Image: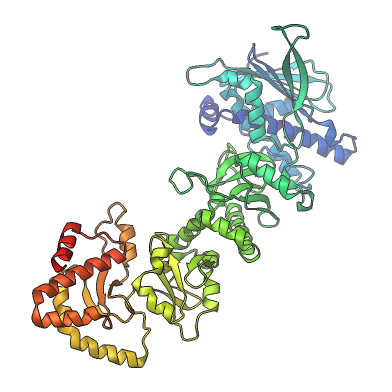
């Protein structure tokens, strides 16, 4: 029979599909198995509507390998194709019989029929790995079988052939290996088993393969004999399609560890589904520990995306917001608009709806854990709390409302983690602010001079130890109407009216002394003031303006941010003996007063955990006084 040219598209289109549309060559097997599943769905539907008597258990997909001759065959006992259907489905590129069937039977229950194919191009992915493709098919109820044969862009032939039963058999002549591609992988048991497990594990029909197992012959030392047996390669029933009542925590955890290659049980799982504007099922996991590369640019977020049990994308980043990027899991939906290769997702309304609902499900699970199992939540927080904070900070505080009640901070009062809600509920009646203090370690923060008076008044302080914390507070501004206030802000407004009047008088009295010390420091500080926050300590550093001293320390370690400087203020305790000494020196020895001012400034730097500019000069000055 004369060779026919492909009708609808040029050789260039077929060449493009083979070489450009699909990213991974192994996807060809997913496409052919999906087509076989579609064919069996169609026959099952026919059986239901015409009372033929065929049940689901009658169907199977068979794979056979001939490594020596580089032959791979995929056989199904589905509805098969007539000659016209061969012409229309395989001779016309991008015409999908499955898509037509789906549209013509849109009222069918999706649990009964789940046609996967949409575009009619998946079949041609076979040419990525095969030098020739043969399709032998016999339509259900027909007496005649047909053979379709093609070596690619040059066209195809259709001839009558002999076939015992209905269904379709596809034979691929696998290409010879090259330096770039090891095509012989596609006729090895290990590779085929792996591809099926990865992409087609949840096809509803069994995928079977004849597998050989070699054993020593009895009574010999070096002679082997091979026994063959049929193995079913796929699980068929996705765990997420089962009801929650059917599954135990052990089964959920085992699936997670096998699927996502973790040796430790997850902290929690979320098994959810939705119908309506976006229909999907999701199985999500919150890991117990962060992967080694989680807080690096190499980490890839995303959920596995399935369509009717067939893996479409291994990591669909659009389904997870950055603040929940630690979540592992999958989503299965037949409502998403896939592109022509089914490898990528088109950004559509359903995708955005699913992403929003998944975000809400994760937030609800974390809130429930925080309320009902504090120990487990704190374990989660130690692993991923930093990411939640990034979520509040990123997008100029866009995630504040969603995430603020998930935040934990170490408390000066309880000496443990507390939520913002817990803090505000026990604030004193006269307390205006949510106070916080920043530093490298809790113990160091606890000893900061600025915290002493606040604690003496019975006010709780949140201790911030992550570099992002102050940026988060600044982005949030307030919580339930209560503003955040750093203990190093310098304007804590803690004095009584009487104390304010007394301090006002002292400031007026000491103006010349403080101005002299400021000038002697040569621009190192914006101002020198008497302190209203110090109690037993002599000096401390506070800051004016938006940028705090702690934020300056963080930014100084970032590229191109070395010039970011806080407006530092040296505060001196008017109740400390050193204050009287300074006033005396102003009258008697201004040179020594300048020396004292420099020493006090460097002491304040050390208390803040900031390296002094000239340690040798600092020690020499101390020695000169000693």
Q: Position of residue 314 (x, y in %)?
A: 58, 40
Quadrant hosting residue 30: top right
Image height of 140 relative to 509, above or below = above
Q: Which of 217 and 319 is in front in this view?
A: 217
On-image quarter of the N terminus: top right
Q: Which of 543 and 399 is in front in this view?
A: 543
Quadrant hosting residue 18: top right
Q: Is residue 331 visible?
A: yes
Q: Is residue 130 visible?
A: no
In the displayed orientation, state which residue is furthest to the front. Answer: 626
Residue visible at 55% across and 78% down? 425
Image height of 324 relative to 121, above or below = below
Q: Position of residue 124 (x, y in %)?
A: 61, 27
Q: Position of residue 474 (x, y in %)?
A: 40, 68
Residue visible at 39% across and 66% down? 445
On-image quarter of the C terminus: bottom left
Q: How many marks?
A: 0
Relative placement, left or right, of 506 versus 445 is left
Q: Position of residue 255 (x, y in %)?
A: 68, 42
Residue visible at 16% across and 82% down? 583
Q: Nearer the viewer, residue 304 or 117?
A: 304
Quadrant hosting residue 600: bottom left
Relative placement, left or right, of 272 versus 601 is right
Relative placement, left or right, of 464 versus 252 is left
The colouring scheme, among rainbow, by chain, secondary structure or one colour, is rainbow
Residue visible at 75% across and 16% down? 160
Q: Which of 163 and 358 is in front in this view?
A: 358
Image height of 69 relative to 625, above or below = above
């Amino acid at each position: 029979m004369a060779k026919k040219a492909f009708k609808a598209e040029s050789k260039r289109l077929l060449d493009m599909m083979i070489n450009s549309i699909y990213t991974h060559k192994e996807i060809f097997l997913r496409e052919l198995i999906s087509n076989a599943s579609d064919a069996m769905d169609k026959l099952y539907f026919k059986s239901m509507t015409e009372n033929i008597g065929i049940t689901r258990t009658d169907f199977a997909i068979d794979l056979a390998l001939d490594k020596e001759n580089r032959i791979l065959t995929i056989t199904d006992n589905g509805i098969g194709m007539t000659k016209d259907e061969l012409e229309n489905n395989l001779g016309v590129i991008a015409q999908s019989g499955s898509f037509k069937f789906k549209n013509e039977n849109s009222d069918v229950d999706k649990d009964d029929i789940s046609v996967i194919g949409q575009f009619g191009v998946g079949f041609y992915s076979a040419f990525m790995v095969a030098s020739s493709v043969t399709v032998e098919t016999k339509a259900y109820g027909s007496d005649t079988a047909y053979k379709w044969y093609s070596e690619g862009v040059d066209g195809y032939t259709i001839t009558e052939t002999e076939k015992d039963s209905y269904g379709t058999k596809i034979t691929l002549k696998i290409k010879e290996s090259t330096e770039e591609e090891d095509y012989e992988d596609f006729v090895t048991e290990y590779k085929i088993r792996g591809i099926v497990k990865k992409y087609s594990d949840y096809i509803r029909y069994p995928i079977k393969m004849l597998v050989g197992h070699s054993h020593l012959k009895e009574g010999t030392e070096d002679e082997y004999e091979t026994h063959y047996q049929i193995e079913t390669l796929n699980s068929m029933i996705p765990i997420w399609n089962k009801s929650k009542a059917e599954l135990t925590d052990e089964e959920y955890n085992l699936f997670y560890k096998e699927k996502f290659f973790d040796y430790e049980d997850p902290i929690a799982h979320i098994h959810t589904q939705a119908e309506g504007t976006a229909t999907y099922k999701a199985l999500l996991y919150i890991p117990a520990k962060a992967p080694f590369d989680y807080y690096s640019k190499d980490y890839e977020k995303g959920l596995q995306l399935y369509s009717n049990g067939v893996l479409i994308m291994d990591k669909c980043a659009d389904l997870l917001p950055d603040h929940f990027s630690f979540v592992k899991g999958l989503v299965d939906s037949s409502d998403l608009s896939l592109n022509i290769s089914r490898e990528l997702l088109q950004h559509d309304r359903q995708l955005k709806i699913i992403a929003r609902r998944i975000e809400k499900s994760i937030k609800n699970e974390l809130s429930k854990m925080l309320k009902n199992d504090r120990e487990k939540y704190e374990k989660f927080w130690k692993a991923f709390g930093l990411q939640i904070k990034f979520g509040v900070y990123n997008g100029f505080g866009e995630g504040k409302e969603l995430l603020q009640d998930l935040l934990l901070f170490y408390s000066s009062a309880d000496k443990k983690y507390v939520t913002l809600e817990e803090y505000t509920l026990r604030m004193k009646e006269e307390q205006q602010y949510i106070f916080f203090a920043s530093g490298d370690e809790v113990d160091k923060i606890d000893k900061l001079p600025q915290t002493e008076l606040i604690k003496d008044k019975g006010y709780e302080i949140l201790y911030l130890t992550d570099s992002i914390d102050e940026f988060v507070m600044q982005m949030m501004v307030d919580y339930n109407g209560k503003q955040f206030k750093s203990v190093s802000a310098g304007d804590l407004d803690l004095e009584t009216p009487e104390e304010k009047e007394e301090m006002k008088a002292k400031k007026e009295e000491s103006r010349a002394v403080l101005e002299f010390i400021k000038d002697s420091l040569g621009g190192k500080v914006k101002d020198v003031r008497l302190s209203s926050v110090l109690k037993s300590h002599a000096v401390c550093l506070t800051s004016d303006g938006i940028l705090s001293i702690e934020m300056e320390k963080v930014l100084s370690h970032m590229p191109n941010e070395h010039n970011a400087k806080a407006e530092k203020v040296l505060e001196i305790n008017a109740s400390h003996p050193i204050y009287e000494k300074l006033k005396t020196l102003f009258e008697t020895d201004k040179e020594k007063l300048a020396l004292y001012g420099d020493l006090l400034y460097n002491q304040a730097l050390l208390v803040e955990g900031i390296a002094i500019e000239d340690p040798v000069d600092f020690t020499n000055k101390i020695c000169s006084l000693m």
